[in-house]
Image: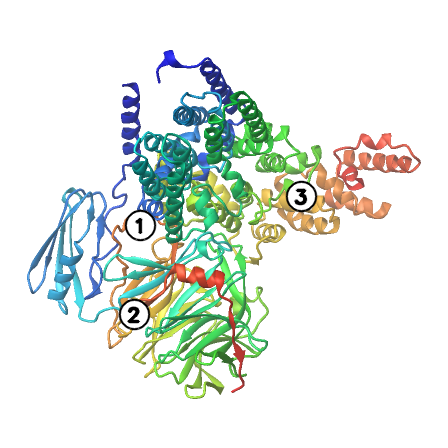
């Protein structure tokens, strides 16, 4: 484009693009970085065959290749903005063909919509790549002056681009019709014919009508993107832009578009839950546990915040000491990992399961997480599977996962180092510690039950304090004090008390089992409950009595004790 | 200009990141040394770790054949390969591999005059515990590398698809689960969708088809699973209860008998004898599970069957008893009536996750048992299928990495002597190293299926199931 011919709103558009950069860098860096964990770019026979056996071959390959650089937040923002810039340039060119002059501001709409989707952690980069390539193709065809040739290009281009770029073939067809010359009726007929062939091709790919329209964007269980109709917004934003650019009253159109931009942007970028979840999960993935705790403590109202906060304490053996220093919910200890749930739980739960020594469920979670990803691959889950296999002592399968990771750009060094450690039988301590917590004797339990595996593991590994703490804390939160006491007797009185100081939380809970002065003395003696805890207990009982007479203030000082928790 | 430089840099970077590391481990993969192979098998392409250019010389009675490989990979041209096999059929060839700095290899291949059935079906599935994302049932031409999809759950409501079973003579079935599911029966090219559950019997699960294609024998089971707590074990699938039933494919009726149903025993994995007059099956005394899963040891039992009337005999007899260290499953009788092959695990009825699972061969004439030491390896060896000439079995083995099943082929001589099993050849053998799906339930047959995944999708989505009726015999 020649700068001398640019309209006055060109600089304004650049400002908007810069604003997108700031938005991404400030509001969504972890959402972008998380993309790298949900896919893989490894040049393996299986991946090649997967690319070929699905539509969108080119956009998938290029998109996956670019995604590997998203591991770094800065690179993620830079690449995203460059891609959006390309979307913008391509749309501007098409608007010039559509209405005779470039429409810079109007062309920001697809940029904003694509940018809003791009920050969804599982919206594939391939989606935007496909958009760019289809717009460039549409521009080339739209310039064709011969109307018959143009119609033929549209008709043939749609199925070809469906194979190469997926659902953006539809965008190509619509953009060709709206931009440039030719008879609209001929173009629309060619579009219809092309679409018919596209859907026949989709049938050969075993894709349903809806999946063909949104491919390669993910549609399936466990995804954040659960409404396929929403995904059509991205290509439709270009179509709407081109249609509006032909509308003479462009000021009104631009006003509407600006409002649309603001609405879409604010909806997508204001989702702090996902940004926080991907942040805390990524920090844990990088084993930066100090940062995990700090980050998690700021958002205890979000389940992954509480979950990672508790996990960070459990790893140090101080979960009971810190359990009640913040409000707890059932999600705080265990995560739901059903198909209806977010896949983030599948990504995050193995972090805790491995610490507990629950190898079986960690494997299940990681396999499940791997399975629900686009392309059935996730670098994060592959790394987890490799680590689980090393922990379990299944080195053959660990080598398989590591071989695949060795073919990736970002994980090669990690994988090669671990392979070397396996070959030299010098297993890193972290895995040996996890292995030391896992059960050596067998027992059975159903999936979806968090307590049974912990009971089995702690029965077999008497020194597994992480699992013991999770089990006992879970029972306390469930207010199952008698059951708590049974397991406490089994776990703490039979080993752990000799190695660790009995947490005050447990002492407080045990006192509740005393139903008389005599039994209280016996409890104190049996469980070696400290004088300080007993004194506090009597003070609490007094406060409860006063509370019964209407004086509730006295109870406030017992916040953080189990007795107070029980009263809630 | 700047843009062009950027493009060049991007393409160069893509090329660099696409570079494949060749040969991470030493030696030949797959291990095709000293194996007996069928005279019609696809080229045994292999990779030599750490090698660059490779020269392969095959010396046989009919001549010498030279092949070349690049970047550590030997890909035999399909036509030249088959010419070689035809010329050397029934003999032994010496193979010399010159892999340069990676060293030289020397081994032999016995090219059996007995061919293997041309088609192999298997299910491709992630080895997850309870979920699946994409399940495909694929039919592979074993004389080449071509394959077609028989089933794809993407177009069948993401439902689970079960094993494809055939009688090697035009009758086959597969189960589709999900809201619109049913048993897809193929009889001579005509497809049926059946609801095999009646008010007297449960729906069909594991099954076999008689040689004439009229009868099917099925397990009806309430299958569930539990997770192992021990760190190196995975999942245990078990039947809360299980019985057998026989289905008449001509009249779409099912029948059973107290000899193979009821609460005393749990019966499963039935198969017909070659003449169709006997049903072999596994059974164990019923116990409450999952607590007693390790105590579930399945014997091999038989019951008579009348192929004229479809009546199951009144008395079942144990022919190979289990003991407290083993349990039988996956019975398959050889088409020549000589052998019965079974999977043997430590306990239970689902050996796929049992690393100790092996294949055993039972001589039906002498009742002697051969534990097939040359065929078995550490890692589950399960779910075999006989070639129609009874000289080959294909089975799923997890010997390579203990998690992902791979199709292995083994020779079984007339005298029961076996050959070293070898991996189903692929155009690029690296596929096995990087593929994260299991090859599940392999089944070999001579005649290709005349339907494909789209037909199955159409059946799943548009055709109502025909209700099978119970018939007293």
* Badge 3: chain ID: A
Residue A330 image label:
3
Q: A446 above or below B344? A: above
Q: Is residue A340 left or right of residue A420?
A: right
Where is residue B144 drawn, in percent x and y? 23, 59
Mark 3 or 1, which is nearer the eye? 1
For the point 55% across and 49% down, the residue is: A339
Give the side of residue A444 with respect to residue A482, left or right.
left
Comparing A189 with B127, the one in front is A189
Could you tell me which chain the residue with mark 2 belongs to?
B
- The furthest residue to the right: A549
Q: CA distance from mark 3 to mark 1?
A: 43 Å
Q: Which residue is mark 1?
A: B431
Pick the front one: B17 or B349: B17
Which residue occupies the foreground of this view, B271 or B402? B271
Nearer-the-camera pick, B237 or A515: B237
Secondary structure beneath dot 1 equals helix
Look at the numbered disc 2 and give the secondary structure of its residue: loop
* B78 horizontally vs B367: left or right: left
Does residue A126 appear in this view? yes
x, y percentage for residue A304?
60, 37
């Amino acid at each position: 484009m020649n700068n001398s011919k640019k309209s006055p709103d060109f600089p304004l558009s650049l400002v908007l693009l810069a604003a997108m950069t700031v938005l991404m860098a400030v509001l969504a860096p972890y959402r972008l970085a998380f993309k790298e964990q949900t896919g893989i770019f490894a040049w393996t026979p299986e991946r090649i065959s997967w690319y070929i056996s699905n539509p969108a071959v080119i956009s998938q390959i290029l998109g996956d290749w670019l995604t590997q650089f998203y591991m770094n937040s800065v690179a993620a923002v830079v690449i995203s903005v460059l891609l959006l810039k390309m979307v913008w340039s391509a749309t501007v060119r098409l608007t010039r063909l559509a209405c005779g002059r470039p429409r810079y501001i109007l062309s920001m709409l697809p940029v904003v919509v694509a940018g809003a989707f791009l920050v969804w952690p599982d919206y594939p980069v391939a989606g935007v790549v496909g958009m760019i390539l289809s717009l460039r193709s549409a521009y080339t065809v739209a310039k064709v002056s011969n109307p018959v040739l143009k119609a033929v290009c549209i008709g043939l281009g749609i199925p070809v681009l469906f194979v190469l770029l997926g659902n953006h073939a539809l965008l190509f067809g619509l953009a060709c019709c709206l931009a440039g010359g030719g008879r609209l009726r001929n173009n629309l007929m060619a579009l219809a014919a092309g679409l018919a062939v596209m859907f026949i091709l989709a049938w050969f790919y075993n894709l349903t009508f809806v999946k063909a329209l949104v491919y390669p964007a993910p549609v399936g269980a466990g995804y954040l993107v659960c409404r396929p109709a929403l995904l059509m917004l991205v290509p439709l934003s270009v179509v709407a832009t081109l249609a509006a650019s032909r509308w003479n009253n462009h000021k009104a159109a631009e006003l509407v578009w600006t409002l649309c931009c603001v609405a879409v942007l604010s909806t997508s970028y204001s989702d702090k839950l996902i940004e926080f979840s991907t942040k805390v999960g990524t920090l844990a993935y990088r084993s930066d546990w100090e940062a995990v705790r700090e980050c998690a403590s700021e958002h205890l109202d979000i389940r992954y915040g509480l979950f990672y906060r508790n996990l960070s304490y459990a790893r140090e053996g101080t979960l009971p000491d810190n359990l009640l220093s913040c409000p707890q919910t059932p999600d705080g200890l265990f995560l739901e990992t059903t198909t209806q749930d977010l896949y983030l739980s599948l990504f995050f739960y193995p972090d805790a399961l491995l610490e507990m020594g629950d190898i079986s469920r960690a494997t299940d979670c990681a396999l499940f997480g791997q399975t629900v990803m686009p392309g059935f691959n996730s670098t994060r889950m592959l790394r987890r599977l490799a680590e689980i296999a090393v922990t379990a002592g299944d080195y053959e399968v660990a080598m398989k996962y590591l071989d695949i990771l060795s073919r990736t750009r970002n994980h090669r060094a990690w994988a090669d180092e671990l392979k070397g450690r396996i070959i030299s039988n010098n297993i890193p301590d972290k895995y040996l510690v996890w292995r030391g917590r896992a059960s050596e004797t067998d027992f059975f339990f159903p999936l979806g039950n968090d307590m049974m595996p912990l009971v089995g593991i702690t029965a077999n590994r008497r020194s597994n304090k992480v699992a013991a703490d999770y089990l006992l804390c879970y029972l306390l939160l469930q207010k199952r004090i008698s059951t708590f006491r049974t397991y406490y007797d089994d776990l703490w009185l039979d080993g752990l008390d000799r190695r660790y100081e009995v947490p005050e939380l447990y002492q407080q809970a045990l006192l509740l089992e005393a139903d008389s002065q005599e039994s209280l003395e016996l409890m104190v003696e049996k469980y070696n409950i400290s004088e300080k805890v007993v004194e506090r207990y009597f003070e609490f009982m007094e406060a409860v009595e006063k509370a019964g007479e209407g004086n509730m203030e006295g109870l406030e000082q017992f916040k953080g004790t189990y007795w107070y928790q029980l009263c809630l | 200009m700047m843009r062009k430089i950027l493009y060049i840099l991007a393409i160069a970077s893509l090329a660099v990141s696409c570079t494949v590391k060749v040969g991470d481990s030493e030696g030949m993969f797959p291990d095709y040394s000293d194996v007996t192979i069928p005279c019609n098998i696809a080229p045994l392409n292999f990779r030599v770790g750490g090698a660059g250019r490779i020269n392969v010389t095959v010396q046989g009675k009919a001549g010498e054949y030279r092949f070349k490989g690049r970047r550590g990979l030997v890909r035999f041209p399909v036509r030249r390969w088959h010419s070689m096999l035809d010329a050397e059929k029934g003999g032994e060839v010496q193979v010399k591999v010159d892999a340069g700095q990676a060293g030289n290899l020397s081994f032999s291949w016995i090219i059996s005059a007995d061919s293997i059935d041309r088609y192999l079906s298997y299910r491709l599935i992630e080895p997850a515990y309870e979920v699946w994302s994409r399940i495909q049932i694929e039919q592979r031409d074993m004389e080449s590398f071509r394959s077609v999809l028989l089933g794809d759950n993407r177009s069948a409501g993401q439902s689970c698809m079960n094993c494809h079973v055939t009688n090697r003579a035009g009758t086959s079935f597969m189960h589709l689960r999900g809201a619109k599911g049913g048993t897809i029966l193929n009889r001579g090219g005509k497809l049926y969708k059946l609801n095999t559950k009646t008010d007297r019997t449960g729906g069909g699960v594991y099954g076999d088809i008689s040689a004439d294609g009229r009868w099917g024998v099925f397990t009806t089971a309430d299958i569930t699973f539990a997770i192992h707590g021990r760190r190196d074990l995975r999942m245990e699938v078990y039947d809360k209860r299980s019985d057998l039933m026989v289905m008449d494919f001509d009249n779409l009726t099912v029948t059973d008998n107290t000899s193979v149903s009821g609460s005393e025993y749990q019966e499963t994995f039935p198969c017909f004898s070659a003449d169709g007059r006997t049903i072999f099956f596994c059974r164990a005394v019923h116990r409450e599970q999952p607590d007693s899963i390790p105590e579930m040891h399945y014997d091999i039992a038989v019951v008579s069957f009348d192929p004229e009337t479809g009546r199951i005999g009144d008395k079942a007899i144990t022919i190979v008893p289990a003991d407290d260290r083993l349990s039988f499953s996956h019975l398959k009788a050889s088409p020549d009536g000589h052998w019965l092959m079974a999977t043997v695990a430590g306990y239970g009825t689902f050996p796929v996750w049992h690393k100790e699972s092996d294949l055993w061969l039972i001589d039906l004439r002498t009742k002697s048992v051969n534990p097939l030491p040359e065929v078995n390896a550490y890692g589950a060896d399960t779910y075999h299928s006989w070639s129609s000439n009874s000289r080959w079995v294909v089975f799923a083995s997890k010997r390579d990495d203990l998690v992902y099943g791979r199709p292995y082929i083994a020779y079984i001589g007339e005298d029961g002597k076996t050959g070293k099993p070898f991996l189903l050849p692929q155009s690029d053998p690296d596929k096995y190293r990087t593929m994260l799906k299991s090859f599940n339930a392999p089944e070999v047959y001579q005649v290709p299926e005349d339907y494909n995944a789209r037909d199955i999708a159409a059946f799943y989505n548009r055709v109502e199931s025909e209700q099978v009726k119970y018939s007293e015999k």
